[in-house]
């Protein structure tokens, strides 16, 4: 399905601007001065590891995209190939380097395994009405992922400042955080544009597939969900699950559930975050 010309032009402009204004972070601009490596590791080591892994796994995400969307609009391809992937891999490299410097192993990132589920979606996507459903799911995932990243980086930034790790807060986290809202804006614009074009059955399918498949960013199995739960607990998100869920799914609710007046926050989002916290708690229990 082709987009209205105005959306297409706005997206192309946006991608041009991101490419020009946000080159991948220069490694020379990063100051790894660490005041107390042990304290930093103890407090935020696992958070850095989680974020490094998710950022590095964009390598796999690009393979997934190429599988799921065999025939993407040109501006989507440019966005992920020329802007998103180069920026995110650099975020991953910087965070991974930081965790090694405080005595941890590199992140165990899965860079190339495309799941059977994704391959099935890809096969179905050869039918263009299905490809639009899959694209919509991709934009929704992009929005919740990028919003989650910004919120988590905000909390990590403040946490690092609180520990007196000002070089890291400023040259690592603040620099990375600055690049995420542009990604979010791309997905939001794309989702808004496509939502208007979906038919009733396509919207129905998007809603149901989203409900079944939603997961917190980077949490692809029970172990990773528990890791995300740990991250939530360290950053204090577990105490504000509904607020967090609301913030990452505001536009999703507007696009998919607006007629469902009772639902302030998509219930599957809240449920997924609660599950992550529960899994983390259970894992932390002795025996
Ligand atoms: Fe990133
Ligand atoms: Fe991002």
Image (spheres, rainbow, N blue to C red):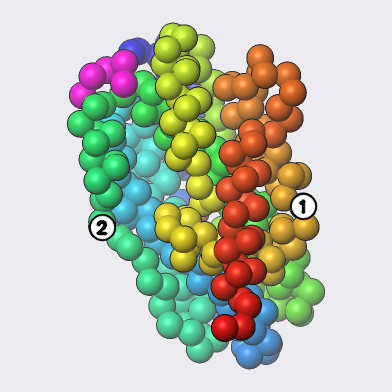
The residue at which mark 1 appears reads as 240
Q: Which residues are magenta?
A: 126-130
In the drawing, does residue 109 fall left or right of residue 27? Answer: left
Q: Give the prevailing secondary structure in the magenta stretch.
A: helix
Q: Is residue 206 above or below residue 234?
A: above
Query: SS for tag 2?
Result: loop
- The one nearer the camera, 128 or 176, is 128
> Residue 251 lies in magenta, yes or no?
no
The Cα atoms of the two marked residues, 1 and 2, are separated by: 34 Å
Measured from the top left, where is residue 207 in percent x and y?
50, 25
Say few, some or many: other residues with alpha carbon within 10 Å of mark 1 (under 14 / 14 to 19 / 20 or more). Answer: few
Nearest the viewer among 33 and 192 is 192
The answer to whether any part of residue 109 appears in the image is yes
Residue identifier under label 2: 112
Residue 31 quadrant: bottom right
Residue 29 in sight? no
With respect to residue 71, does 45 lie above or below? Answer: below
Tell me which label, 1 or 2, sits earlier in the chain. 2
Q: Secondary structure at mark 1?
A: helix
| Residue lying at 43% horizontally and 22% vertically, measured from the top left | 205
């Amino acid at each position: 399905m082709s987009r209205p010309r105005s959306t297409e032009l706005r997206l192309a402009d946006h991608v041009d601007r991101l490419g020009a204004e946000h080159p991948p972070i220069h490694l020379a601009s990063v100051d790894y001065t660490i005041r107390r490596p042990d304290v930093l590791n103890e407090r935020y080591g696992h958070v850095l590891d989680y974020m490094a892994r998710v950022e590095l796994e964009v390598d796999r995400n690009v393979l997934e995209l190429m599988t799921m969307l065999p025939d993407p609009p040109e501006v989507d391809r440019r966005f992920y190939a020329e802007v998103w992937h180069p920026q995110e891999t650099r975020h991953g490299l910087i965070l991974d380097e930081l965790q090694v410097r405080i005595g941890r192993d590199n992140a165990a990132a899965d860079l190339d395994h495309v799941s059977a589920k994704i391959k099935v979606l890809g096969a179905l996507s050869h039918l263009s009405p299905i490809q639009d459903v899959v694209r919509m799911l991709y934009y929704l995932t992009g929005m919740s992922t990028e919003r989650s990243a910004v919120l988590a980086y905000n909390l990590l930034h403040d946490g690092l400042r609180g520990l007196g790790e000002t070089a890291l807060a400023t040259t690592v986290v603040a620099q990375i955080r600055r690049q995420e809202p542009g990604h979010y804006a791309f997905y939001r614009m794309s989702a808004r544009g496509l939502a208007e074009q979906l038919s009733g059955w396509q919207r129905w399918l998007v809603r149901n597939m989203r409900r079944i498949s939603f997961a917190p960013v980077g949490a692809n199995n029970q172990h990773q969900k528990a890791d995300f739960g740990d991250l939530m607990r360290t950053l204090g998100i577990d105490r504000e699950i509904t607020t967090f869920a609301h913030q990452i799914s505001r536009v999703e609710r507007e696009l998919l559930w607006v007629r469902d007046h009772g639902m302030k926050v998509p219930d599957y989002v809240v449920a997924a975050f609660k599950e992550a916290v529960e899994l983390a708690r259970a894992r932390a229990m002795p025996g």
